[in-house]
Amino acid sequence: MITVTNLALLAFMAITAWAIARTLNLFVATMLAGIYSLLIATVFVLLDAVDVAFTEAAVGAGITTVLFLGALLLTDRHAKPHKHRFGTYGPMLLVVLLGAALVYTTLDPLMPHFGDAGAPAQGRLAPEFLADSVRQVGRDGPTATHIPNVVTTTLASYRGFDTLGEVVVIFTAGVGVLALLGGGAIGAGAGGRRRRSARKDGGTVSGRGSTTDGADA
Amino acid sequence: MWQTFLGLYNYWIVILLMMAGFYIVMSRHNLVKKLIGLNIFQSAVFLFYISVGKVRGGTAPIVEEGITSYSNPLPHVLILTAIVVGVATVSLGLALVVRLKEAYGTIEEDEINEMDAAG
């Protein structure tokens, strides 16, 4: 049953990705990307990664979609079709060749099959973490974690510095977004207002004139 | 034959999605579309990690009486971090796209290149 669901969901994901590649309507592409995220979240549940599925559904299907919708509101809703009719043949050829090479690699007899308990990835660290968590759950004392979820203990305790690094990355990205958009919404700051009035005076937005406006802000 | 297909099916779908994302990034001139392609590529990598961590007959790595086999929790931890970092990079990319729209009036890469070339 799980196998059939896995087969079907992954096939749906491939179809969604194809539809995203085809469409020129960016709103449609964003919605399809949200569907894609929900599909991959369901696959994560099937593959026992419940924490990852939860995060993907909240962050991938939720926040990312909202961010894309916000960006569409501030830019364009439609992509322009390719100017040269054969312009996409080069990338297609490259992608097909690279994909074929990767599929050829998976046919190696040493490649561990899906779900193989004896695969190299299953050795070393993971049994150590699992055994330690099982030991810690029922125990008392200052070092006992009492948390049955191994992903939580690993994330917050054994790999705590990694999570700290993640927070630093998010902070940096936040600072970067604020620096790029001039603090808050477009046109809310002093610079934004100046740009907007300059644009009104200049008439159209396109052309080199607006580029220099952006440069001094 | 069927066993090989089932054992490698996840990896093949990962390759397919990865190549689809790569193709969108390379062939589409629209910058928002490129970011969506980047997202697809990224999720393919996530799917690869989680597929590698799955153990047949295992269950979610939450300690419970009477259960002996769990899936590998380490890829889950890594991908949790990666998803959140991914949304941070996407938001930065979208902010750049909005700035480019402000400065050039378009989000098509070829038109921006033409404007730059025209001086």
Image (cartoon, grey):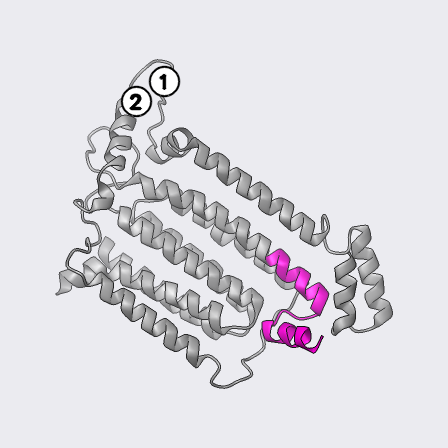
Q: Which residues are magenta?
A: B94-119
| Residue A197 circle label | none
Q: Residue at x 45, y 48 (%)?
A: B83
Residue B55 lies, in percent from the top left, at 22, 45
Identify the element where label 2 is drawn. Answer: helix
Where residue A127 appears, as percent x and y from the top left, is 23, 34
Viewer-closest of A162 and B63: A162
Give x and y (percent) for residue A15: 38, 69
Q: Residues within 10 Å of mark 1 (few under 14, many from 20)?
A: few
Q: Quadrant of the C terminus of chain A?
A: bottom right
Of the residues under marks 2 and 1, which one precedes in the sequence?
Answer: 2
Contact check, label 2 and label 1, Cβ < 8 Å: yes
Q: Which residue is mark 1?
A: A143
Disc 2 and disc 1 on one polypeptide chain: yes
Q: Secondary structure at mark 1?
A: loop
Q: Is residue A7 in sight in this rendering?
A: no
Confirm whether the magenta stretch covers residue B115. Answer: yes
Q: Disc 1 sits on a residue from what chain? A: A
Name the chain under label 2: A
The answer to which quarter of the image holds residue A139 is top left
Location of residue A120 with respect to A32 vertically, above or below: above
Amino acid on which disc 2 is placed: Gln
Q: Tell me the number on the disc at residue A136.
A: 2
Choose top left, top right, bottom left or bottom right for residue B4: bottom left
Q: Position of residue A44 (x, y in %)?
A: 34, 50
Q: Is residue A211 left or right of residue B93?
A: right
**Does the magenta segment cover residue A3?**
no
Q: Looking at the magenta stretch, what is its main secondary structure? A: helix
Question: What amino acid is at disc 1?
Answer: Thr
Report how far apart the C-alphas of labels 2 and 1 lie in the structure: 8 Å
